[in-house]
Amino acid sequence: MSSNDKELVGNYEVTKSGVVTRREVLLMGAMAAASGSLIAGSQNPAKAADAPAAPAGAYKAKDFKALAGTMTGLSASQITQHLKLYEGYVAKSNAIHESLKTVELTSANATYSAVRELLIEQSFAHNGVVYHEYYFNNLGGKGGEPTGDFKSAIEENWGSTGKFMDFLKAAGKSARGWVIVGYNTRAGYVDAYALDTHNIASPANIVPLVVLDVYEHAYMIDYGIDRAKYLEAFINNLSWAAVDKRLSIATKHASGIDTTL
């Protein structure tokens, strides 16, 4: 397939013949690896090194440097420093993944053990990578009014685009880490969630559409502790076209409980 036949939209690859999500590709790879492991018939499941292994350095940082210096209200310094933090999550995700291959397992315990701590922190680092990629991917637009099917979806849930925008700002003031406006593949509508940290209260079967980072690192260089001004800047730089494409993909390729169990 030529490069003209596909387009990268957020975390999805859209082709003329259909859509394959990265999650599906990873799942297919994991299933194939697991099948190979079963055929091999490992006799020592207590060793983490026997588990199917993903490629070394599986997390690759995406290049968002073009955003720096191009947005109104979000300075080049603010974006550059934020990208350094994102790249740190990529590095830590790879490091934790490697550590889990050889971690000692006989002391596994729910109060404290090395394997427990690595598993918990892997979810934190992984979500730190993914949510930041959604965040940077929905920046670089011109703001304004929501468009397309996303506009219709929020009007159905919130009554009007004005009420939704007021809600988004209030959510941004209320959350401690992230605001996720996403498509609920289980129920078939757009809804919103607040996360106080990357891996706490992250909802299942929600495809992120608008991702808003409200950690202080996202705005303190430009606005100090004035989060309200940052929220205005975020909205003014939103790419509603990117949001609408995410919704289009999510609604056409639902992965809710009714279609996967």
Image (cartoon, helix red, strand yellow):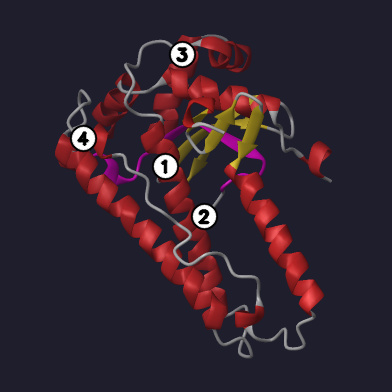
Viewer-side label of 3, 4: 4
Magenta span: 202-219
Q: CA distance from mark 2 to mark 3?
A: 28 Å
Q: Are marks 2 and 1 in contact (CB under 8 Å)?
A: no
In the structure shown, which secondary structural element does the residue marked by tag 2 occupy?
loop
Label 1 amino acid?
A: Glu
Q: CA distance from mark 2 to mark 1?
A: 15 Å
Upstream in sequence: badge 4 or badge 1: 4
Upstream in sequence: badge 2 or badge 3: 3
Question: Residue 65: image x %, image y %?
Answer: 25, 39
State the residue at coordinates (44%, 25%): 168
Residue marked by disc 2: 199
Q: CA distance from mark 4 to mark 2?
A: 27 Å
Q: Quadrant of the N terminus?
A: top right
Residues packed near mark 4 inside 10 Å, few (<14), some (14 to 19) or many (20 plus) = some
- For residue 110, side relative to residue 118 (left or right): right
Upstream in sequence: badge 2 or badge 1: 1
Label 2 amino acid?
A: Asn
Viewer-side label of 2, 1: 1
Label 3 amino acid?
A: Pro
Residue marked by disc 1: 133
